[in-house]
Image (tube, rainbow, N blue to C red):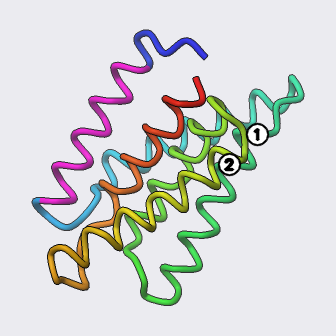
Amino acid sequence: MEWGLFGGVFLAWCAALCWFDVRERRLPNLLTLPAASVALAGALWVVVDGALAPLIGAVLWTAVNGAAFLGRGMGAGDVKLAPTLGAVVAAAGGVPSVLLAILGAQLLTLAWALSARDRTVPHGPAMIAAAVLAAGFAA
């Protein structure tokens, strides 16, 4: 996958989300919802060409985070961030890369919480770091 301009915009978007989540402890709808809409539209678009991975990746990461949200394990912003990251990672490396990114995000958040001795650390930066690493290694 060629990243080009998309990669630069994606990384800037990721940086903004990390800044907000660390500073404000929230992921703004203004950044998550339009991106999720575009990611889902793109994932549906490529299904026409037979590429199911981006749609599966978006749904998979959203389902995992949605279940955690229902159990009060994470915030709604993390659920709204998931479809975009899932679609991008799956487009770069398929569904196995998404599974690795999900696991990586959980482990990064756990490590952060343990090192900070705080049970309530933001999960968005860990999701983004894991997604960027998984997509980068897959590309």
Residue 20 part of the magenta segment: yes
Q: Residue at x 54, y 62 (%)?
A: 103
Q: Which residue is mark 1?
A: 53
- Separation (CA) of disc 2 from disc 1: 6 Å
Circle on res. 88:
none
Give left or right: position of 27 versus 55.
left
Q: Quadrant of residue 110?
A: bottom left
Work out whether 133 lies above or below 139.
below
Residue 41 part of the magenta segment: no
Q: Are marks 2 and 1 in contact (CB under 8 Å)?
A: yes
> Bounds of the magenta span?
7-22
Where residue 104 appears, x then y in whole percent?
48, 57
Q: Residue at x 44, y 59 (%)?
A: 105
Looking at the magenta stretch, what is its main secondary structure?
A: helix
Q: Residue at x 26, y 47 (%)?
A: 17
Work out whether 58 lies above or below 87.
below
Answer few, some or many: residues within 10 Å of disc 2's Cα (few below 14, many 20 plus, some between 14 and 19): many
Q: Which residue is mark 2?
A: 57
Give left or right: position of 29 versus 48.
left
Where residue 69 appears, x then y in whole percent?
48, 79
Give left or right: position of 92 versus 110.
right
Most extreme residue toward the left, as rendered?
23
Q: Nearer the viewer, residue 23 or 106?
A: 106
Q: Is the N terminus in the top left, top right, bottom left or bottom right quadrant? A: top right
Q: Is the C terminus in the top left, top right, bottom left or bottom right quadrant? A: top right
Amino acid residing under circle 2: Gly
Amino acid residing under circle 1: Ala
